[in-house]
Amino acid sequence: MRLVIQRVSHARVDIAGETVGSIGPGLMILVGVEQGDTAVDALWLAKKAAGLRIFNDDEGVMNRSVVDCGGEVLAVSQFTLTASTKKGNRPSYIRAAGHELAVPLYEDFCRLMEELTGKSVARGRFGADMQVSLLNDGPVTIIMDSRLKE
Protein backbone atom coordinates (compact mmCIF):
# COMPACT_ATOMS: atom_id res chain seq x y z
CA MET A 1 0.00 0.00 0.00
CA ARG A 2 1.10 3.53 -0.70
CA LEU A 3 0.08 6.74 1.01
CA VAL A 4 0.58 10.36 0.14
CA ILE A 5 0.03 12.31 3.35
CA GLN A 6 -0.39 16.07 3.34
CA ARG A 7 -0.64 18.30 6.39
CA VAL A 8 -3.56 20.59 5.60
CA SER A 9 -5.36 23.60 6.98
CA HIS A 10 -8.51 22.20 5.36
CA ALA A 11 -9.48 19.71 2.66
CA ARG A 12 -12.58 18.39 0.97
CA VAL A 13 -13.70 15.95 -1.68
CA ASP A 14 -16.61 16.64 -4.03
CA ILE A 15 -18.48 14.25 -6.29
CA ALA A 16 -20.81 15.64 -8.96
CA GLY A 17 -20.83 19.03 -7.24
CA GLU A 18 -21.66 17.62 -3.79
CA THR A 19 -19.20 17.69 -0.89
CA VAL A 20 -18.98 14.13 0.46
CA GLY A 21 -16.13 14.66 2.93
CA SER A 22 -14.38 17.63 4.47
CA ILE A 23 -12.00 18.41 7.31
CA GLY A 24 -10.36 21.32 9.05
CA PRO A 25 -6.72 21.14 10.17
CA GLY A 26 -5.28 17.65 9.91
CA LEU A 27 -4.18 15.09 7.35
CA MET A 28 -5.36 14.58 3.78
CA ILE A 29 -4.32 11.01 2.88
CA LEU A 30 -4.38 9.50 -0.60
CA VAL A 31 -4.49 5.68 -0.38
CA GLY A 32 -3.28 3.33 -3.12
CA VAL A 33 -3.71 -0.43 -2.80
CA GLU A 34 -1.55 -2.86 -4.80
CA GLN A 35 -1.95 -6.54 -5.58
CA GLY A 36 -0.53 -8.56 -2.70
CA ASP A 37 -1.28 -5.96 -0.03
CA THR A 38 -2.78 -7.28 3.20
CA ALA A 39 -4.38 -6.14 6.45
CA VAL A 40 -0.84 -6.09 7.90
CA ASP A 41 0.06 -3.32 5.43
CA ALA A 42 -3.06 -1.32 6.35
CA LEU A 43 -2.29 -1.62 10.06
CA TRP A 44 1.39 -0.65 9.68
CA LEU A 45 0.53 2.40 7.58
CA ALA A 46 -2.33 3.49 9.85
CA LYS A 47 -0.07 3.35 12.92
CA LYS A 48 2.67 5.27 11.12
CA ALA A 49 0.27 7.91 9.73
CA ALA A 50 -1.49 8.46 13.06
CA GLY A 51 1.83 8.79 14.89
CA LEU A 52 3.66 10.85 12.26
CA ARG A 53 5.05 13.90 14.05
CA ILE A 54 4.55 16.61 11.42
CA PHE A 55 2.56 19.21 13.38
CA ASN A 56 4.29 22.05 15.20
CA ASP A 57 4.63 22.13 18.97
CA ASP A 58 4.65 25.35 21.00
CA GLU A 59 8.23 26.08 19.89
CA GLY A 60 7.40 25.70 16.19
CA VAL A 61 9.13 22.32 15.87
CA MET A 62 7.38 19.47 14.04
CA ASN A 63 6.97 17.30 17.09
CA ARG A 64 3.24 16.53 17.33
CA SER A 65 1.05 13.95 15.59
CA VAL A 66 -2.47 14.40 14.28
CA VAL A 67 -3.59 12.63 17.47
CA ASP A 68 -1.59 15.00 19.69
CA CYS A 69 -3.09 18.11 18.11
CA GLY A 70 -6.65 16.79 17.75
CA GLY A 71 -6.56 17.07 13.96
CA GLU A 72 -8.92 15.47 11.48
CA VAL A 73 -8.30 12.98 8.65
CA LEU A 74 -9.65 12.80 5.10
CA ALA A 75 -8.77 9.56 3.29
CA VAL A 76 -9.30 9.22 -0.46
CA SER A 77 -8.66 6.07 -2.48
CA GLN A 78 -6.38 6.65 -5.45
CA PHE A 79 -5.34 3.75 -7.65
CA THR A 80 -2.99 5.98 -9.66
CA LEU A 81 -0.51 5.83 -6.75
CA THR A 82 0.33 2.33 -7.99
CA ALA A 83 1.44 3.60 -11.42
CA SER A 84 4.56 2.25 -13.05
CA THR A 85 6.32 4.73 -15.32
CA LYS A 86 9.29 2.58 -16.29
CA LYS A 87 8.38 2.27 -19.97
CA GLY A 88 7.06 4.94 -22.29
CA ASN A 89 4.96 7.90 -21.29
CA ARG A 90 1.69 6.17 -20.48
CA PRO A 91 1.57 4.95 -16.87
CA SER A 92 0.74 1.30 -16.28
CA TYR A 93 -1.66 0.41 -13.48
CA ILE A 94 -1.12 -3.33 -13.69
CA ARG A 95 -0.02 -3.44 -10.01
CA ALA A 96 -3.26 -1.83 -8.79
CA ALA A 97 -5.43 -4.15 -6.73
CA GLY A 98 -8.90 -4.98 -8.02
CA HIS A 99 -12.02 -3.88 -6.17
CA GLU A 100 -12.28 -7.19 -4.29
CA LEU A 101 -9.00 -6.43 -2.47
CA ALA A 102 -8.73 -2.65 -2.68
CA VAL A 103 -12.13 -1.73 -1.20
CA PRO A 104 -11.78 -3.83 1.98
CA LEU A 105 -8.20 -2.65 2.58
CA TYR A 106 -9.12 1.00 2.04
CA GLU A 107 -12.05 0.63 4.44
CA ASP A 108 -9.80 -1.24 6.90
CA PHE A 109 -7.25 1.59 6.77
CA CYS A 110 -9.99 4.17 7.43
CA ARG A 111 -11.40 2.14 10.34
CA LEU A 112 -7.94 1.79 11.87
CA MET A 113 -7.33 5.54 11.54
CA GLU A 114 -10.63 6.14 13.34
CA GLU A 115 -9.56 3.84 16.17
CA LEU A 116 -6.12 5.43 16.43
CA THR A 117 -7.28 9.05 16.25
CA GLY A 118 -10.53 8.66 18.16
CA LYS A 119 -12.30 10.62 15.42
CA SER A 120 -14.42 9.83 12.40
CA VAL A 121 -12.43 9.76 9.15
CA ALA A 122 -13.91 11.75 6.26
CA ARG A 123 -13.79 9.79 3.00
CA GLY A 124 -14.14 9.99 -0.69
CA ARG A 125 -16.11 7.35 -2.58
CA PHE A 126 -14.17 4.41 -3.97
CA GLY A 127 -14.07 4.41 -7.76
CA ALA A 128 -15.89 7.73 -8.16
CA ASP A 129 -14.71 10.71 -10.20
CA MET A 130 -13.72 12.98 -7.32
CA GLN A 131 -12.52 16.55 -7.11
CA VAL A 132 -10.19 17.01 -4.16
CA SER A 133 -9.27 20.45 -2.89
CA LEU A 134 -6.95 21.29 -0.04
CA LEU A 135 -4.71 23.91 1.45
CA ASN A 136 -1.38 22.20 2.11
CA ASP A 137 0.07 23.62 5.32
CA GLY A 138 3.83 24.09 5.20
CA PRO A 139 3.84 22.59 2.63
CA VAL A 140 4.29 19.22 4.29
CA THR A 141 3.90 16.14 2.08
CA ILE A 142 5.07 12.64 3.07
CA ILE A 143 5.05 9.52 0.89
CA MET A 144 4.86 6.12 2.62
CA ASP A 145 5.00 2.64 1.08
CA SER A 146 4.36 -0.46 3.18
CA ARG A 147 6.73 -2.44 0.95
CA LEU A 148 9.58 -0.23 2.16
CA LYS A 149 9.01 -0.83 5.87
CA GLU A 150 12.00 -3.11 6.31
Image (tube, rainbow, N blue to C red):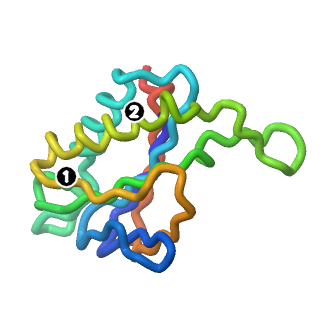
Judged left or right of residue 97, residue 38 is left
The three-letter code of the residue at mark 1 reads: Ser
Q: Residue 138, can we see it?
A: no
Percent of width and height locating residue 122? 28, 59
The three-letter code of the residue at mark 2 reads: Leu
Q: Residue at x 45, y 46 (%)?
A: 31
Question: Quick one: SS at disc 2?
Answer: helix
**Number of callouts:** 2
Q: Residue 69, can we see it?
A: yes
Q: Residue at x 36, y 60 (%)?
A: 28
Q: Earlier in the sequence, mark 1 or mark 2?
A: 1
Q: CA distance from mark 1 to mark 2?
A: 23 Å
Q: Nearer the viewer, mark 1 or mark 2?
A: 2
Q: Where is mark 2, residue-wise? A: 105
Q: Residue at x 23, y 37 (%)?
A: 112
Residue 134, image quadrant: bottom left
Percent of width and height locating residue 80? 62, 48
Residue 3, image quadrant: top left
- Mark drawn on residue 65: 1
Q: Nearer the viewer, residue 16 or 33?
A: 16
Crowd class of label 1 (few under 14; some 14 to 19; many from 20; radius 10 Å): many
Percent of width and height locating residue 70? 11, 60
Position above or below: 84 against 22: above
Q: Residue at x 39, y 33 (%)?
A: 104
